[in-house]
Image (cartoon, grey):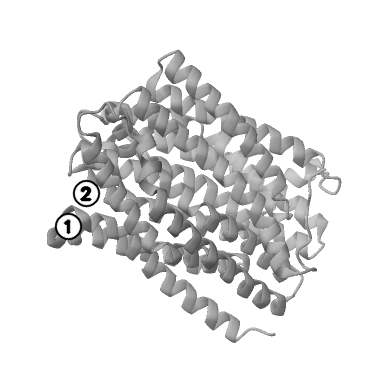
Amino acid sequence: MAATKDMTTGNPARLLFGFSLPLMLGNVFQQFYTIVDTIIVGQGVGMQALASIGAADWLNWLFLWMAAGMTQGFSILFAQYYGGKDDKSLHKSIGNAVILTIGAAVVLTVVGEFMAPPMLALLKTPEDIIAGSLTYLRVMIGGLTVIMFYNLEASLLRALGDGRSPLIAMVIASCTNIGLDLLFVMGFHLGIAGAAAATLIAQGISCIYCFVVFRRISFLKLKRQDFVIDISLAKRLLRLGMPVMLQDAIISVGGMVLQSVINGFGVLFVAGFTATNKLYGILETAAISYGYAISTFVAQNKGAGNDGRIKVGMRKGIVMAFATSVLISVLMFIWGKDVLSLFISAEEVQAEQVLQIAHHYLMVMSAFLIILYALHTYRSALQGMGDTVIPMVSGMVEFTMRVSAAIFLPRFIGQEGIFYAEILAWSGACVLLVTVYYKRIAFSKT
């Protein structure tokens, strides 16, 4: 049976850390097999293939984040019903979320496959890598249904306080992905398509595992009538899910504008930037995990009417998040260049130039990492309270700051200006989220 956890009682700090730790490990494994894709493609296929994946990254993330964002929004309602001990409404909300997820998966897959070629052209993807980028996108977008259902299942388990099962799912998926990467890319020489296919198959195994766990939870015995659309409930789910999905879409579009500027700097710069972007996932993984923990903690306690407990939990969560960000930054300052060298084949003629670009970007990100951790913490707290609109607006702020920096900074300080686009995007969003959170808390009941 899944290790569901009621977060409305007990020590908040212990609950948050205990819930975050398996999520961190799970996210590390998830990022690990993404990194393995990059290492195997970079070492086994070459720098041009690495640049192809990098040029497709933001467009790929646009659809992946939209898929994850909608289900993440749904999980807020799951957690509130669970915290309020309302099993009947929880069952009905899960059934309606399944129907909505199927519809969203179909729409996103069709739109994604249709839009991929013109979007790559719009992003000014270099001619020598556009074919590889399109291949990667075709495969990844084709598997969106699997990805959406894994995210729905994982979001439900997290809403119930189960951080262990998603960890096990990711460990299984990571091992599968590494084996299939080696088989498809190194063994069968399937190149970029093989790496993408390995990722999707691994995600499918995660989906199956989470479904088996879900079926074993004794109080989640859904009935046929739970899968009949309830217009009022569906609207409530969409009011939570759509802003999160749009927030992620807006952030991704800003990233695509950034990518279009990067593409203009040539293949070497794209390859270096891609290497650090793959490591970015590791830098962010603890922030995402703390975010999930805080969102679940806040949502369950909101459902139970424990506003005072939310304040205590947030104070503990902020301290843990900030301390973790400082530790990761220090580790990157010491060993970052060694880690980046794994992504770049030493046999490439211009490998040292690519490594220098990647390392410079990593140092800039590491210096300001604490801002990213604050962003995730406060955004997740507001979402747990049931407010997904302000976080969506923060995504608009990120978009504005990222695009403005990408367009204007290189004109004044050259290519290095691109490295500060992410920092400015984090900072602008963080100011809004922190301000709104403390205003809400100041006027809430203790």
Asked which quadrant contains residue 372, the reply is bottom left
Tell me residue 336's x, y (percent): 39, 48
Instruction: Tell which residue pokes out farthest to the top in this image.
Output: 188
Tell me residue 411's x, y (percent): 13, 59
Tell me residue 407's x, y (percent): 20, 58
Residue at 57% across, 60% down: 291
Q: Is residue 140 left or right of residue 157?
A: left
Label 1: element kind: helix
- Which residue occupies the foreground of this view, 380 or 114? 380
Per the model, the C-alpha gap separating discs 2 and 1 is 9 Å
The residue under label 2 is which amino acid type? Val
Residue at 69% across, 56% down: 19
The residue under label 1 is which amino acid type? Pro
Q: Nearer the viewer, mark 2 or mark 1?
A: 1
Q: Is residue 117 above or below residue 289?
A: above
- Which residue occupies the foreground of this view, 310 or 25? 25
Mark 2 and mark 1 in contact? Answer it, CB < 8 Å.
yes
Q: Is residue 224 left or right of residue 123?
A: right
Is tag 2's residue or tag 1's residue first in the polypeptide sequence?
Answer: 2
Label 2: element kind: helix
Instruction: Tell which residue pokes out farthest to the left in this image.
Output: 411
**Image quadrant occupied by the C terminus:** bottom right
- Which residue occupies the foreground of this view, 300 or 336? 336
Q: Is residue 51 visible?
A: yes
Say which residue label 2 marks. 261
Say which residue label 1 marks. 410
Crowding at mark 1 (Cα within 10 Å: few <14, some 14-19, many 20+): some
Asked which quadrant contains residue 269, the reply is top left
Crowding at mark 2 (Cα within 10 Å: few <14, some 14-19, many 20+): many
Residue at 38% across, 27% down: 41
